[in-house]
Image (tube, helix red, strand yellow):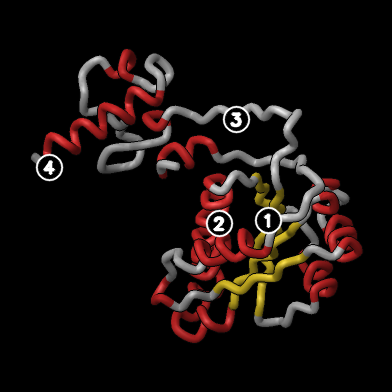
C-alpha cells in the first residue's frame, strides 16, 4: 500500500473481530515503531503486549470502562523511559522529548497496522497509576498510550472523520500570515473537488518527468 494512501485510510476503530492477531504481525508493528526518529537517537520507548483476558478487563477499568479496550484481541501499551531522556536532556527530555519520540513510534505502528489490514485505536485517556500497578511498570517508565489492535469486523463500515483544510491551519513565515497555495485556482484544485487518486497520479507524473 502506498504511504500516502495508508495515511489517508488510517482511522480509529473500536470494534474488532474476535480472532487473534498473530504474533508475527504484532512483531511487525513493534519493528515499525522502533524505527521512528528520537531525540539523540535515545530510543526511549518500551512496549508491553497484552492478550490475557483478565488483564485487558483491568486495563478497561483504568480507561473509564472503555469497552473496546477489554474486547480488543491485543493491547500494546507504549511506555516512555523518562530516565533515558532525562540523563541527556534534563527536564526537557523527560517532559517533552520522550513524549514526542514515543508518539512518533506509535504513528509508525498505526500506519503499518493499516497496511497489514489491521485496525487500531490510540487510547490516551486512562488512570496512569492504575495502569502502572496492573502491569507492574517501574517508576522510570511513563505509560503514554494503550493501542488496541485487531482485525476489522466484516459487517461494519467506518466513516473517516473530516479534517480541516491544511490552508486553514498553516501560516507563511510568521503566525497569522495566511498560507497561499502555490498553484492558481486553489479552490478548484482542492482534494474535495477532484478525487484523491487523481492528485496522487499527477504527483507521480511530475516526479517521473523530473527524473527524466
| Residue at 77% across, 40% down | 15
Disc 4: CA contacts within 10 A as few (<14), some (14-19) or many (>=20): few
Disc 4/disc 3 C-alpha distance (Å): 36 Å
Could you say which disc has been placed on residue 161 in the image? 3
Disc 1: CA contacts within 10 A as few (<14), some (14-19) or many (>=20): many
Of circles 4 and 1, the one toward us is 4
Q: Are marks 1 and 2 in contact (CB under 8 Å)?
A: yes
Disc 2: CA contacts within 10 A as few (<14), some (14-19) or many (>=20): many
Q: Are marks 2 and 4 in contact (CB under 8 Å)?
A: no
Disc 1/disc 3 C-alpha distance (Å): 19 Å
Say whether disc 2 or disc 4 marks the residue closer to the N-terminus: 2
Disc 3: CA contacts within 10 A as few (<14), some (14-19) or many (>=20): few
Say whether disc 1 or disc 3 marks the residue closer to the N-terminus: 1
Quadrant occupied by the N terminus: top left
Say whether disc 4 or disc 3 marks the residue closer to the N-terminus: 3
Say whether disc 1 or disc 2 marks the residue closer to the N-terminus: 2
Q: Are marks 1 and 3 in contact (CB under 8 Å)?
A: no
Q: Is residue 131 above or below residue 194?
A: below
> Farthest residue toward the left?
212
Residue underneath mark 4: 211
Q: Nearer the viewer, residue 64 or 45?
A: 45
Would you say 189 lies left or right of 103 here?
Answer: left
Residue underneath mark 1: 147
Disc 4/disc 1 C-alpha distance (Å): 40 Å
Amino acid at each position: 500500500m502506498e504511504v500516502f494512501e495508508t495515511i489517508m485510510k488510517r482511522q480509529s476503530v473500536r470494534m474488532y473481530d474476535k480472532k487473534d492477531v498473530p504474533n508475527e504481525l504484532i512483531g511487525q508493528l513493534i519493528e515499525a515503531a522502533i524505527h521512528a526518529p528520537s531525540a539523540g537517537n535515545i530510543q526511549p520507548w518500551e512496549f508491553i503486549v497484552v492478550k490475557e483476558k483478565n488483564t485487558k478487563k483491568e486495563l478497561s477499568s483504568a480507561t473509564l470502562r472503555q469497552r473496546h479496550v477489554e474486547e480488543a484481541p491485543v493491547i500494546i501499551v507504549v511506555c516512555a523511559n523518562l530516565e533515558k531522556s532525562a540523563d541527556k536532556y534534563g527536564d526537557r527530555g523527560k517532559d517533552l522529548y520522550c513524549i514526542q519520540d514515543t508518539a512518533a513510534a506509535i504513528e509508525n505502528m498505526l500506519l503499518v497496522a493499516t497496511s497489514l489490514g489491521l485496525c487500531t485505536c490510540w487510547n490516551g485517556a486512562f488512570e496512569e497509576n492504575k495502569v502502572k500497578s496492573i502491569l507492574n511498570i517501574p517508576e522510570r517508565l511513563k505509560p503514554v498510550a494503550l493501542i488496541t489492535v485487531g482485525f476489522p469486523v466484516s459487517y461494519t463500515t467506518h466513516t473517516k472523520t473530516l479534517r480541516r483544510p491544511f490552508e486553514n491551519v498553516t501560516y507563511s513565515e510568521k503566525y497569522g500570515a495566511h498560507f497561499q497555495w502555490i498553484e492558481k485556482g486553489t479552490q478548484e484544485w482542492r482534494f474535495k473537488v477532484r478525487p484523491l487518486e487523481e492528485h496522487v497520479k499527477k504527483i507521480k507524473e511530475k516526479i517521473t518527468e523530473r527524473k527524466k
